[in-house]
Image (spheres, rainbow, N blue to C red):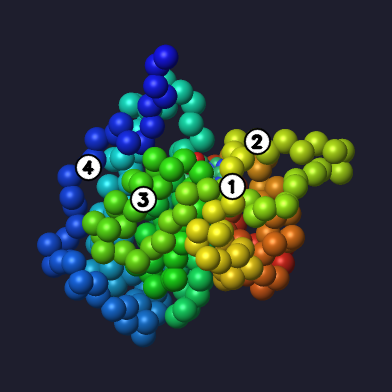
């Protein structure tokens, strides 16, 4: 029987981390400097360069994954527009804020959030992608944490008023929260890139299990990046 290819089959990209970033030398974020830099709409130079190189590595991986894995078997992983997500996350930064990515795939956005200063975690169902994310985090000297499992907490069921409980491309599996040692309502900012029609399910999940004052950032191909709080667009 032919073995289903997965992210492990995709060759690793050359290491692109800036040379100044040696293990253990992770720069502490200077919030004042970053906030000042934000007033001009941009990140400060060094962090901006790192994030842009991280995203570039993520895009290169995606092209190889699309060619080597997705051409044989459909897979739900398609990367978001990293620049659009970065722009949405910038105003949400505050020291100590906890960030969670639902379906973190290769971990680029979870690592980006960590580099931006969030206490950052990602949950991904495909464990071969989780391995890619962990490897990327280690090479970028990021503290981002990843769990292999589902971002759907145990016991939650999605039901539309007409009784339709289809999950679209969202897979089933054991909850990833136990491995993180956190529950959904521990997070201040939750991010996802749903496929078309999956936003209502994510809004309901957040309403049932998220914190009331948490931000939900949903990136979609149709509507760009929207930020919700208490179920309403802010
Ligand atoms: C459209 S991709 C988004 C990737 C990434 N978040 C981004 O924005 O670039 C959706 C990801 O969610 C993952 N996924 C699907 N169902 C999941 C579930 N129940 N729990 C965790 N991850 C899931 C898929 O394997 C895929 O990697």
Regarding mark 3 in the picture, which secondary structure is present there?
A: helix
Dot 1 lies on which element? loop
Tell me the tag on residue 13. Answer: 4
Q: CA distance from mark 4 to mark 1?
A: 30 Å
Residue with the most extreme right position: 162
Of the numbered discs 2 and 3, the one sitting upstream in the chain is 3
C-alpha gap between disc 3 and disc 4: 13 Å
The residue sitting at 20% across, 71% down in the picture is: 24
State the residue at coordinates (26%, 64%). 141
Q: Is residue 165 left or right of residue 35?
A: right
Which badge, 3 or 1, is on the more N-terminal residue?
3
Label 2: few (<14), some (14–19) or many (≥20) C-alpha neighbours in 10 Å: few
Say whether disc 1 or disc 2 marks the residue closer to the N-terminus.
2
For marks 2 and 3, give the CA distance: 24 Å
**Residue at far left of view:** 19
Q: Nearer the viewer, mark 1 or mark 2?
A: 1
Q: Which residue is mark 1?
A: 174
Q: Tell me the residue that label 3 is attached to.
A: 133
Q: Give the residue number, with chain letter if any, for mark 2.
A: 168
- Nearest to the observer: residue 152 or residue 105: 152
């Amino acid at each position: 029987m032919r073995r289903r290819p997965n992210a492990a089959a995709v060759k690793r990209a050359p290491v692109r981390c800036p040379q100044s970033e040696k293990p253990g030398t992770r720069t502490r974020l200077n919030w004042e400097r970053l906030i000042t830099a934000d007033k001009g709409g941009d990140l400060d130079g060094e962090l901006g360069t790192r994030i842009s190189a991280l995203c570039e590595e993520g895009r290169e991986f995606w092209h190889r994954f699309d060619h080597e894995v997705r051409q044989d078997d459909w897979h739900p992983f398609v990367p978001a527009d990293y620049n659009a997500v970065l722009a949405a996350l910038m105003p949400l930064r505050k020291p100590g804020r906890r960030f969670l990515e639902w379906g973190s795939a290769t971990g680029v956005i979870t690592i980006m959030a960590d580099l931006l200063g969030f206490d950052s975690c990602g949950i991904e169902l495909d464990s071969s992608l989780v391995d890619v994310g962990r490897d990327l985090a280690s090479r970028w000297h990021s503290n981002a944490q990843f769990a292999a499992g589902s971002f759907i907490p145990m016991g939650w069921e999605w039901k539309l008023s007409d009784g339709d409980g289809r999950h679209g491309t969202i897979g089933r599996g054991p909850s990833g929260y136990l491995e993180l040692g956190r529950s959904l309502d521990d997070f201040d900012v939750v991010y996802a890139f749903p496929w078309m029609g999956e936003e209502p399910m994510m809004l309901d999940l957040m309403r049932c299990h998220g914190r009331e004052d948490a931000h939900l950032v949903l990136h979609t191909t149709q509507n760009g990046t929207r930020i919700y709080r208490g179920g309403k667009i802010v």
